[in-house]
Image (tube, rainbow, N blue to C red):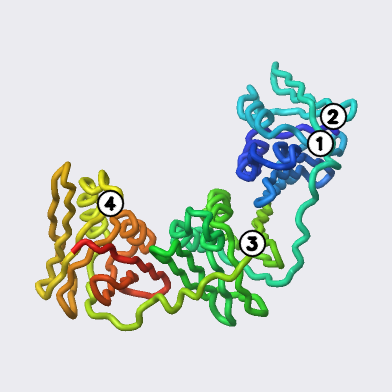
Amino acid sequence: MKFEIMRDRLLDGLTDVMKAISQKVAVPILTGIKIEIDEKGLRMTGSDSDITICTFIPVEENGEQLIRVIEPGSIVLQAKFFSEIVRKLPTNDVTIEVSNGTQTHIHSGKSEFHLIGSNADDYPILPNVKDDHRFSLPADLMKSIIRETVFAVSQQETRPILTGVHWDATEDSLTCVATDSHRLARRTVQPEQMPESPFSVVIPGKSLQELNKILPDHSDPVEIVIADQQVLFKTKNVLFYSRLLEGNYPDTSRLIPSEYKTSVTVNGKMLLQAIDRASLLAREERNNIVRFSADEGKVLEISSNSPEVGKVEETVEAVDVKGEDLKISFSAKYMMDALKAIDGQDIAIHFTGAMRPFILKSADNDAILQLILPVRTF
């Protein structure tokens, strides 16, 4: 095996693949990256068993030659050392050659590294994902869906199913829900191209966070293929495989109230900044609690109290307040996460009482919904 490649393109592909590499794997060869070169281009694969990322660099792109293939072949190289070497090579011209089975030589400028690789035949084969359900979403929309939901997954392994985001597809819409049982984030989209039959799967939150780092910011399509135990996300030059979580996701629709006693419309940015300031003193407390009160006067009161530090009180002008007077306490972190996810100008907050879950939406549409359980303090 021998080929020449541009260092910057090699590094781009390597950076994506490294997101699937873990040093804590049961199969030692998975600490390495599988490298395959043929007349079409270079494929690099990394995996930790849960996530597998495969990147492809073509020999030629837009009339520019990126790779010169001298001899096709394959090798597995230790990911940690290989990525560090490539990152620090002195020039943009890199030659990689394998001789005597696994002896790998990396040459750039006046630098030459010699690594001992492993046989690529020993590397696990890529998951076989059959096209049970196939559809596509624009990459920027995918990033939005992840940003608006994944923060609400559970960090506790006591209920593994809650560490993932529930994707539920019907004939005309896709609903993505995450909850840690204290809060809930829901995003609904109507993709132009839906899968032919409905599906319901739970994708690990950690997988979606890593996928989010790889996806481009533009609207190029991401093809999504869902099978029995795997989901595959395909972009132009990256394949991202993730296992699916097993088990039944709880029915979260019944948690969302349909009637409200108090409704508040307020500028989301102003409210976020006010809660951020109020939480400055509450951060010392274990639960980071902020108190919130609303009455007919359209002035919202936000306060926080820490016996050892002091207290803070602030008022925010509401656009509109309807219904009963309200006093409620909640986690400042949960509220700030929810407001950041909606990221709209005006936010509608609907309350059903001081100790009942309340919901936040954009005042303009229902596509994003956030639900938070209050805390008993009053």
Question: Residue 261, how many percent across, how many down?
Answer: 23, 80
* Residue picked out by circle 4: 288
Q: CA distance from mark 1 to mark 3?
A: 29 Å
Mark 4 or mark 3: which comes first in sequence?
Answer: 3
Question: Residue 142, how many percent across, how many down?
Answer: 53, 61
Closer to us: 378 or 58:
378
Q: CA distance from mark 4 to mark 1?
A: 51 Å
**Circle 3: is it few (<14), some (14-19), or many (20+) Cα within 10 Å?**
many
| Residue 66 appears in the picture as rendered | no
Residue 241 quadrant? bottom right
Mark 1 or mark 3: which comes first in sequence?
Answer: 1
Q: Amino acid at mark 2?
A: Thr
Split into 4 quadrants, where in the image is the C terminus?
A: bottom left
Mark 2 or mark 3: which comes first in sequence?
Answer: 2
* Marks 4, 3: nearer the viewer: 4
Mark sitting on residue 244: 3
* Residue drawn at x 66%, y 26% as measured from the top left: 85
Q: CA distance from mark 4 to mark 2?
A: 55 Å
* Residue drawn at x 72%, y 41% as measured from the top left: 30
**Circle 1: is it few (<14), some (14-19), or many (20+) Cα within 10 Å?**
many
Do labels 1 and 2 touch, CB within 8 Å?
Answer: yes
Q: CA distance from mark 4 to mark 3?
A: 33 Å
**Circle 4: is it few (<14), some (14-19), or many (20+) Cα within 10 Å?**
many
Q: Classify residue 49 as left or right of residue 38.
A: left
Do labels 4 and 1 touch, CB within 8 Å?
Answer: no
Mark 1 or mark 2: which comes first in sequence?
Answer: 1
Q: Amino acid at mark 3?
A: Leu
Mark sitting on residue 102: 2
Mark sitting on residue 75: 1
SS of the residue under disc 1: strand
**Residue 286 higher or lower than 322, as above or below:** above
